[in-house]
Amino acid sequence: MRRFAPLAAIVLAPVFAAIAVPAVIAQPPASAPGAPDRSRVTAGTYAADPNHTMVVWKLDHLGFSNYTGIFGDVTGTLVLDPADPAAAKVDVTIPIAKVTTASAGLTGHLLRPGKDGAKPDFFGPAAADARFVSTRVVLDDDGDEAKVTGDLTLNGVTRPVTLDVDFHGAGAMGGKQTVGFEAEATIRRSDFGLGFGVPMVGDEVELEIHAAFEKQ
């Protein structure tokens, strides 16, 4: 079989070259385009990147484990000026009807209509979008963290909610200036008319938000 090795090398060499050249050209950059450097942030109006912005939620299930899900395809705007970060304004919309979980049964229950014309246990099949509109921003001493208070409208009910926000990074992505943040908050679902199963299923819902905004 060895006598065929030189012939195989001659025949396959162009194939390997065709594969290798694009691989070299497509090498990723040496470093990520975003970095936790506030000097990279520029003033302007930003739009939420729906492909990289999500709300992860978690609540206790019967004391044994946690239910977890994700709201994606978030849209909205962020008005930001690094010279006056406390004046920042954020207005985002979360499509509740697109909720994702690891369980088809859980997702179905969240969006299921009520039985015999009764109110749904959770969001129901015509779930309205949620919306968060900021009303106040308070920064810590070093400016990397902030408490962002705003009005959260969920399931037709509006309540004030405060987010603990961390600056994650800024830079250029795909030719657009981009800023990213992480945030956490805890809400009570019963405050928004979603108290089915309480207290067997937890009332407190932990929110973990990952948000990227592209400058317009």
Image (cartoon, grey):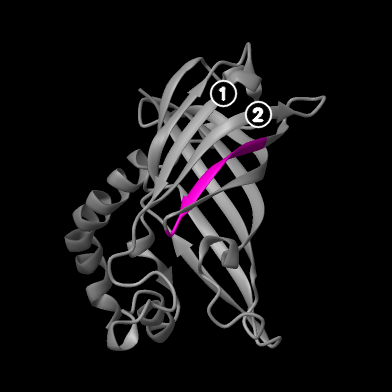
Q: Which residue is mark 2?
A: 137
Span highlighted in magenta in the image: 148-155
Image position of 7 (left or right of 58): left
Look at the image and say whether residue 174 sits in the magenta stretch. no
Horizontal and vertical percent position of residue 87: 60, 19
Depth order, front residue of 68/96: 96
Residue plotted at (62% across, 81% down): 201
Residue plotted at (29% across, 44% down): 21
Horizontal and vertical percent position of residue 73: 36, 51
Quarter placement of the N terminus: bottom left
Q: Residue furthest top?
A: 83
Residue 62 found in image quarter: bottom right
Q: Are marks 2 and 1 in contact (CB under 8 Å)?
A: yes
Quarter placement of the C terminus: top left
Q: Which is nearer the N-term, disc 2 or disc 1? A: 1
Residue plotted at (64% across, 72% down): 203
Q: Secondary structure at mark 2?
A: strand
Horizontal and vertical percent position of residue 111: 35, 74
Depth order, front residue of 169/46: 46
